[in-house]
Image (cartoon, helix red, strand yellow):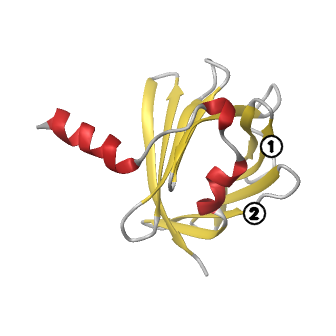
Amino acid sequence: MRIFLALAYLVLAGPAVAADKLTLSSLAFLTGDWVSDREGFVIEEHWTDARAGVALASARGVQDDGVRFLRFAVAQETADGVTLRFNRFNGDFTTWETNGPSVMRLAEARENVAVFEATDPDSDVQRIVYSVNAAGAIEVKAYRVDQDGPYLVEFTLTRAR
C-alpha cells in the first residue's frame, strides 16, 4: 500500500526539473506574507517576488513577547541553478552561523513544491521542503541535525494578508 501511495504522489505531483535548470519562478508560490502559530510560538515569513535574479525572505519567531530567532535569506538564480543563503540571529542579534551564511541549493521543484538541500554536509539544516497543501497553506519541513542527531521541524504557514 505504501509503495502505491508513493507512486501515486510522484505521478500526481508532476515532474521534477533538474537542479541546474531551475529558476526563481519555481519559488513564486512563496511570495507574500505568511504566519504560523504553534501554541504561542508565532513564526512570520515574508518572501518578495524575484527581480534581477534575486528574491528576499525574512522570518521572525516570537514566543512569550520575546524574539526566539530572526532569519534573513537571499535566493539567487545563476547559470548553475538557484542558491539560498541565509543567516539566523538570536533576539540580541548574535548570529547562529559562525562561518558565514548557511548555503542551500534548490535541488527539486515542481508546481507548489520547492526542496532545498545544504551544500555543506556539516550544516545543521540539511534539507527544507516547502509545499502547498489542499487548503492553500504552506507546509514547511526542515530536516536538521544537532549533537543528539537528526530531527524534523514542521510547521504550517497561512496567508497573513
- For the image, the number of numbered tags is 2
Task: Note whether residue 18 is visible.
Answer: yes
Binning the other alpha carbons within 10 Å of mark 1 as few (below 14), some (14 to 19) or many (20 upward) gives: few
Taking 29 as reference, is 75 above or below it?
above
- Quadrant location, the N terminus: top left
Q: Is residue 21 left or right of residue 8?
A: right
Q: Amino acid at mark 2?
A: Asp
Outermost residue to the right: 52
- Which quarter of the figure has residue 65? bottom right
Is residue 156 toward the left or the right of residue 77 in the image? Answer: left
Residue 124, how many percent across, how many down?
60, 29
Quarter of the image where the C terminus is located: bottom right
**Which mark is drawn over residue 49?**
2
In the image, 117 versus 148, the foreground residue is 117
Task: Identify the residue at horizontal 68%, vertical 30% (top origin).
Answer: 20
Instruction: Work out whether residue 61 can be spotted.
Output: no
Which residue in the protein does label 1 denote?
94
Residue 144 point in image, percent of width and height: 51, 33
Q: Earlier in the sequence, mark 2 or mark 1?
A: 2
Considering depth in this image, is 36 or 12 the residue closer to the camera?
A: 12
Does residue 13 appear to the left or right of 1 in the view shown?
right
Q: Residue furthest left?
A: 1
Determine contact: label 2, label 1, CB under 8 Å.
no
Secondary structure under badge 1? loop
Of the pair 15 and 29, the residue shown nearer to us: 15
Residue sitting at x 72%, y 32%: 103
Label 2 secondary element: loop
Image coords of residue 39 (percent x, y): 42, 66
The single residue placed furthest to the bottom in the displayed view is 161
Three-letter code, disc 1: Thr
Question: Callout 2: 10 Å neighbours few (<14), some, many (20+)?
Answer: some
Residue 8 image position (x, y, % from top left): 25, 44
